[in-house]
Amino acid sequence: MSTTNMKIMLDKQRQFFASGSTLPIKFRIEQLNKLKILLQQHESEITEALKKDLNKIEMEAVVTEIIFVAKEIEFIIKNLPKWAKPTKVSSPFPLCWPGRSAIHYEPYGSVLIIGPWNYPFMLVMSPLVGAICAGNCAVVKPSEIASYTQDVLTKLINNYFSPEYIVAIKGGHQEVSQLLKEKFDYIFYTGGTQVGKIIMQAAAEQLTPVTLELGGKSPCIVDETIDFSFAARRIMWAKLLNAGQTCLAPDYILVHQTCKAALIKELKVAATLFYSDDPANHASYGRIINKKHFERIIKLMQKGNILLGGKANETDLYISPTLIDGVDWSDSIMQEEIFGPILPILTYENMDEVIQTINTHPKPLSLYLFTKNKNTEHSILNRVTFGGGCINDCLLHIVNYHLPFGGVGASGIGAYHGKYSFETFSHRKSIYKKRFLLDFSIQYPPYTETKLTWFKRLMSLSLRL
Ligand code: NAD
């Protein structure tokens, strides 16, 4: 899209937003229902595109990219009328008395949603649900790297919605750079940290608020108190889903040194149970998105001992489920997010060491802890900062739309899902409404000692009320 066309399109969105058409809850619910119909009627088209982009088998595509968006839409439709009502809060004595205070939720205007390629459908649709439910207009830019999904997404969005309300644009970083020169009212970005910085810099120029959903190295801690076969299945499922290209996948394992061997044995069993001895020919196993990422992941395997897998086929963009040990934090595999099916295994002697190790690195998007020890759980939850996570499981905190999903520090800014999506895409407007019953003269000049004494007395009373 040319710069002129982009400007025209955004002007139309601004006019449409200013008309107030997106404000009624009825309108928002109608649009959410439209999105739900889109998901129902085009499921096979969407799953076929995901198969071409990432070799996602139908079940994985439906479960990870479609079903939870549909469920979230239902949940939001049910609760939106309640959430959108002003929230009443108390009005402190004496200055705000007698009167009423409330938080009013209003949409920002035109929001820009920029998506990544790893869950290319869901990570555009889920923020879009948030933008719609809060009453915004939206410009959607899916990832160009998952090109088949980009085609389907843009076609469907542009068929189902009018461009002055929601429009999807194809393209890569040049199109994003062009879009970022325009004034949006909110930017919601999902992707890598480096590009996240570019987005935030551009947003700062216009003082546009942002949500950044980024990545990072998510640790998985395993202590000696648990059942290793359960833990191994849960870890390997999470790691190998989408061939390891999941932002919140366990990036590496920190296992107590006394049970490393037992865990590795079960991790191997789990990998074979899921994808057989020949994952390359297993229908459920995914592929790396492109040659660039394939080569990047292969380089990460150059150091360490391969305990399982380590096989690859460039023509097919296949990398086998791989376990590695003998690496440390100076190796490149421990210095960047792996984003592939390679799982390094490091050991620890005590929890203090684990906490110190994680805390000396950028704050992770997720953390997974396998333990039955309540003290260990307490220490990790209270002494380590991370976006979110699970105790004795992996990934599943993301599917619970009662929980906010997002990172902290280097793994992101802001959160969404369910009610948190509504809040993310809404400005909270604070309103205090006073009656004409009384006027405290002490608030007005001229200011005197007596007024100050009385004011202090009233304030101390207000604290006790
Ligand atoms: P990316 O940063 O390469 O691209 C994301 C989006 O930014 C794309 O739409 C792309 O067109 C655009 N873009 C790329 N380069 C740009 C530039 N120079 N200027 C402006 N825009 C640009 O991210 P990716 O490789 O698609 O995604 C992988 C990363 O995203 C991983 O780090 C992963 O952890 C993270 N991620 C995070 C979440 C989350 O929810 N926190 C979800 C998925 C992926």
Image: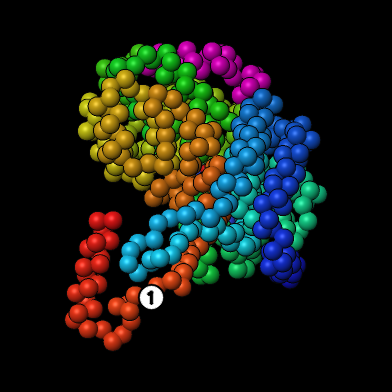
Q: Who's the residue at 39% across and 27% down the image? A: 391
| Percent of width and height locating residue 240 | 53, 26
Residue 448: image location, x then y, percent = 22, 83
Q: Is residue 69 above or below residue 229?
A: below
Q: Which of the colour schemes (rainbow, by chain, secondary structure, one colour) is used? A: rainbow
> Neighbour class for label 1 at 10 Å: few (<14), some, many (≥20)?
few
Q: Residue 198, how many percent across, how many down?
A: 51, 60
- Residue 385 appears in which quarter of the rendering? top left
Relative depth, front residue between 31 and 300: 31
Depicted 366 relative to depicted 225: above or below:
below
Q: Is 277 within the magenta?
A: yes
Q: Amino acid at mark 1?
A: Asp
Residue drawn 48% across and 42% down? 404
The answer to whether any part of residue 196 appears in the image is no
* Left or right of 457 on screen, residue 232: right
Report the residue marked by disc 1: 439
The magenta stretch is 263-285
244 left or right, relative to 261: right
- Farthest bottom residue in view: 446
Q: SS at mark 1?
A: loop
Which image quarter is the C terminus in?
bottom left
